[in-house]
Image (cartoon, rainbow, N blue to C red):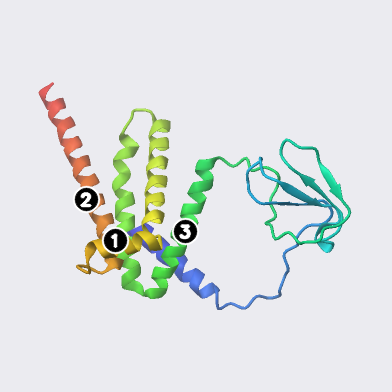
Amino acid sequence: MLLSFFLCFGISFLLDQWKSVPPSQSIGIPLGSEGLILSNSLSKNETAVVLLNGSSEPFGPRVTAIPDLPLTYSNSATTNFDLPLVPFGDDTPWYLKNLSIDIRLNAEMFQRKFLEGFFPFFIYVGSLIFLLCSLGYVMKFSVWPLANLFLASLAFGGILTLITFLNTPEIQEVIDSFLNKLIPTTLALPLFFLGFGLLLNAYSLLTFAAKRRLDYDY
């Protein structure tokens, strides 16, 4: 737990210091050349536009791909398309995609807590690390290591998804109205992490004691 906390603190500190380092030069991100694909979604069943001359001529000739319809060609367009640059398809598994989004959102929350000060960072991140470390019994839930690894990854992803959900402004307002200013809203989630972690540890200890009792009886 201590190593995890100091690792998170060190990364947040380095990211905060990195902002003050001036870049050596400004490098523009290339938007693509001929055959640039524009799409509205990462799904394979969405309309896509192919700019034949690339981003240099956004109103130039293009090919429009609509699902279940033939490709259509046009010499020019009267309106521009404000769409992200993505390929036709995304083969990333949904679990890994959602996990990466949750990790990024929680990393941004870590950075905000770091900017608030050491004690807010310590309370939030320390309680979260305690909760995640309390999931250790999941790694011994089954006799198959791969099954335990799968269950642990699901538990880890579920915790991150729950935290992302609880940190949304709408849920924060609901929590604030429910607590009726009994405790600060900023302490509600850390107390939840600590309480849930204590329950998991209590369950783990009771399970361990029950197994020892059964082994002793036999």
Drawn side of residue 2 relative to residue 63, left or right: left
Instruction: Answer with mark 3 or mark 1, whichever residue precedes in sequence.
Output: 3
Q: Residue at x 24, y 61 (%)?
A: 178
- Pinpoint residue 87: horizontal percent, then vertical percent: 70, 47
Drawn side of residue 22 relative to residue 57, left or right: left
Residue marked by disc 1: 175
Residue 1 seen: no
Q: CA distance from mark 2 to mark 1?
A: 21 Å
How packed mark 1 is, by other alpha carbons closer than 10 Å (few <14, some 14-19, many 20 or more), is some
Under circle 2, the secondary element is helix
Question: Could you tell me which quadrant the N terminus lies in?
Answer: bottom left
Q: Is residue 180 above or below residue 45?
A: below
Q: CA distance from mark 2 to mark 3?
A: 25 Å
- Pinpoint residue 90: horizontal percent, then vertical percent: 64, 43
Question: 30 or 201: nearer the eye?
Answer: 30
Q: Are marks 2 and 1 in contact (CB under 8 Å)?
A: no
Residue marked by disc 2: 198
Q: Nearer the viewer, mark 3 or mark 1?
A: 1
Under circle 3, the secondary element is helix
Q: Nearer the viewer, mark 2 or mark 3?
A: 3
Q: Residue at x 50, y 47 (%)?
A: 98
Q: Residue at x 38, y 61 (%)?
A: 170
How packed mark 2 is, by other alpha carbons closer than 10 Å (few <14, some 14-19, many 20 or more), is some
Residue 175 picture quarter: bottom left
Residue 105 is tagged as 3
Residue 52 seen: yes
- Pinpoint residue 6: horizontal percent, then vertical percent: 38, 63
Q: CA distance from mark 3 to mark 1?
A: 20 Å
- Which residue of the protein is positioned furthest toward the left in this rendering? 217
Drawn side of residue 191 relative to residue 30, left or right: left
